[in-house]
Image (cartoon, rainbow, N blue to C red):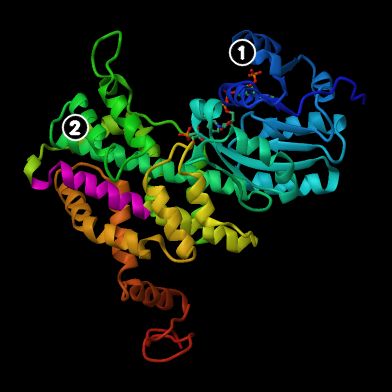
């Protein structure tokens, strides 16, 4: 293949929401970038909107021309839907590329797919790496958080571009190499799992304010705005305030009162829960958040349930718990869901032998990504002190949990008494209570298992295992 006129330093396929903005971001940072889109008309539309950045963009209508316009060894970012589209795009590119060329999947891939693709690349070429990108449309355009995985030498080749286009926190790039094969995509998946839990807990306190306290959407928005000035400062609290205060231009009603209450999901939250179950590590707040989205989608069943049982939510006297208790409950819930998320990453790193820098993960989540928040700076410090310790046991977070735990308990208890569902906050509280109890109730489980299956148990008064109760059949 000729490389005459191959000027682009990098290429990108998939000019959708994320890919189009990422390409503009790369061009804006001074890199010449070749672009290609399956539907050629979208490439024309993209170029029309590129303005002065067009001079840094090399649009192509065929994959062959696209590949030929990138300087060798080539680096090509894929920003297409996860799954079959990625495999199909790699298969289409493979005959056009040389062994040292590099394909970078920047979509929300399942990390098991990334592990497989990395192995296939090792056998068939070209080179391959998977990176997680977070920040939505705006992040892609002006600075996302980038979670790199794969071959370190591949990261070293393109890392300067990824760092340049990433968000910055106090001038530090929110982009880093996090480990081999699918490590970057595993971290992005857990990021999204935490995102699910964080969003769900915010929705739960919104529910207490709306259905329990009878507050208007605008008043709820004011509360979120106030919280955003304190310990809960975060992108998700900020946008929740904006969502709550926005009116529908057509009806003038609050947007929140117009939006149908069935949550969509594309899979990353579910993958996080599946991964936690497969790795045997507790992620109950995240699992509860995924289950809550699943329940929300069953609108017909919920309608029938309300007809049969009556609606659950009941008004509650604001003084029973108060707005400040909701803030404290969110603080506690947030710490716990991050403790679970980092615990899951730690477990996956052990399983795959990946040397994953947990403080670095918290560091690159401090800006650019959807879960960016003030607390992530403290998490990065806590994980730097000891990355293998449960985050709840880091002194800063122990103190915060001691300050907020009672409020979390009051919110969950009063919510339950008033029929206000708070599944993620409840799961967080149960996790907290189990993880601070030396003598749990699993002795009963062991007794039951031994009774019906002779599975054996360990005794508290003797070393070793394989003991049976007197119920065992002789
Ligand atoms: N939206 C978001 O907030 C975020 C999305 N992501 C991930 O980024 C990736 C892209 O998402 P997003 O930009 O939102 O998606 P869009 O639907 O906006 O764009 C998808 C792009 O992929 C192309 N495409 C679709 N199917 C194929 C195919 N079979 N072969 C080749 N190209 C194809 C489309 O081309 P065409 O114009 O021809 O349809 C389009 O350019 C996904 O993996 C998503 O999960 C990651 C972080 C945030
Ligand atoms: O990766 C993202 C944010 O970090 C995407 O916006 C993703 O689509 C969010 O997940 P879901 O669509 O399942 O809510």
Query: Whole-percent x and y of residue 315?
Result: 10, 37
Tell me which segment is drawn in magenta: 320-336
Q: Residue at x 79, y 44 (%)?
A: 121
Query: Whole-percent x and y of residue 464?
Result: 48, 88
Left/right of residue 358 with respect to residue 236 in the rendered view: right
Query: Whole-percent x and y of residue 304?
Result: 27, 31
Above-or-below relation of 413 to 385: above
Q: Residue at x 71, y 39 (%)?
A: 158
Q: Which residue is mark 1?
A: 50
| Mark 2: few/some/many CA within 10 Å (<14, 14-19, 20+) | some
Outermost residue toward the front in this view? 171
Above-or-below relation of 91 to 365: above
Query: Which comes before the other along the chain, label 2 or label 1?
Result: 1
State the CA–CA distance, disc 2 to disc 1.
Answer: 43 Å
Q: Which residue is mark 2?
A: 210
| Residue in the foreground of this view, choosing between 241 and 28 | 28
Task: Let me know if residue 11 appears in the view.
Answer: yes
Task: Report if the CB atoms under discs 2 and 1 are less than 8 Å apart.
Answer: no
């Amino acid at each position: 293949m000729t490389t005459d006129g191959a000027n682009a330093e990098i290429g990108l396929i998939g000019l959708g929401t994320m890919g189009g903005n990422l390409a503009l971001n790369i061009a804006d940072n001074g890199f010449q970038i070749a672009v290609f889109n399956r539907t050629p008309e979208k490439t024309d539309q993209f170029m029309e909107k590129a303005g002065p950045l067009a001079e840094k963009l090399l649009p192509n209508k065929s994959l062959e021309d696209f590949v030929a316009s990138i300087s060798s060894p080539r680096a090509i970012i894929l920003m297409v839907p996860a799954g079959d589209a990625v495999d199909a795009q790699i298969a289409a590119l493979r005959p056009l590329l040389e062994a040292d060329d590099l394909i970078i999947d920047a979509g929300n891939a399942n990390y098991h797919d990334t592990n497989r693709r990395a192995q296939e690349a090792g056998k068939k070429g070209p080179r391959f790496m998977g990176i997680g990108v977070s920040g939505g449309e705006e992040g892609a355009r002006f600075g996302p958080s980038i979670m790199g995985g794969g071959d370190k030498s591949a990261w070293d080749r393109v890392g300067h571009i990824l760092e340049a286009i990433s968000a910055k926190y106090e001038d530090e790039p929110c982009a880093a190499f996090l480990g081999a094969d699918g490590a970057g995509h595993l971290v992005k998946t857990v990021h999204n799992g935490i995102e699910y839990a964080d969003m769900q807990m915010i929705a739960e306190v919104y529910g207490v304010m709306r259905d329990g306290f009878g507050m208007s959407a605008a008043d709820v928005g004011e509360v979120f705005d106030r919280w955003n000035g304190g310990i809960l400062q975060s992108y998700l609290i900020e946008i929740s305030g904006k969502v709550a205060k926005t009116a529908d231009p057509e009806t003038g009603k609050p947007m929140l009162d117009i939006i149908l209450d069935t949550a969509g999901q594309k899979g990353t939250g579910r993958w996080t829960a599946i991964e936690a179950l497969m790795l045997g590590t507790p992620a109950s707040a995240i699992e509860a958040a995924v289950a809550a989205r699943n329940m929300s989608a069953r609108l017909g069943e919920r309608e029938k349930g309300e007809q049969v049982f009556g609606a659950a939510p009941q008004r509650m006297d604001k003084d029973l718990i108060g707005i400040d208790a909701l803030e404290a409950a969110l603080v506690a819930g947030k710490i716990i869901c991050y403790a679970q998320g980092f615990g899951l990453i730690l477990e996956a790193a052990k399983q795959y032998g990946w040397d994953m820098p947990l403080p670095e993960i918290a560091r690159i989540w401090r800006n650019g990504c959807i879960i960016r928040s003030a607390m992530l700076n403290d998490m990065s410090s806590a994980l730097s002190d000891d990355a293998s310790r449960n985050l709840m046991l880091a002194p800063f977070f122990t103190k915060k949990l001691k300050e907020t735990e009672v409020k979390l308990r009051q919110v969950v208890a009063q919510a339950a008494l008033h029929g206000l569902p708070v599944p993620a906050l409840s799961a967080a509280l149960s996790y907290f209570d189990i993880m601070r109890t030396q003598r749990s109730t699993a002795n009963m489980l062991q007794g039951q298992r031994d009774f019906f299956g002779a599975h054996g148990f360990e005794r508290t008064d003797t070393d070793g295992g394989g003991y049976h109760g007197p119920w065992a059949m002789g």
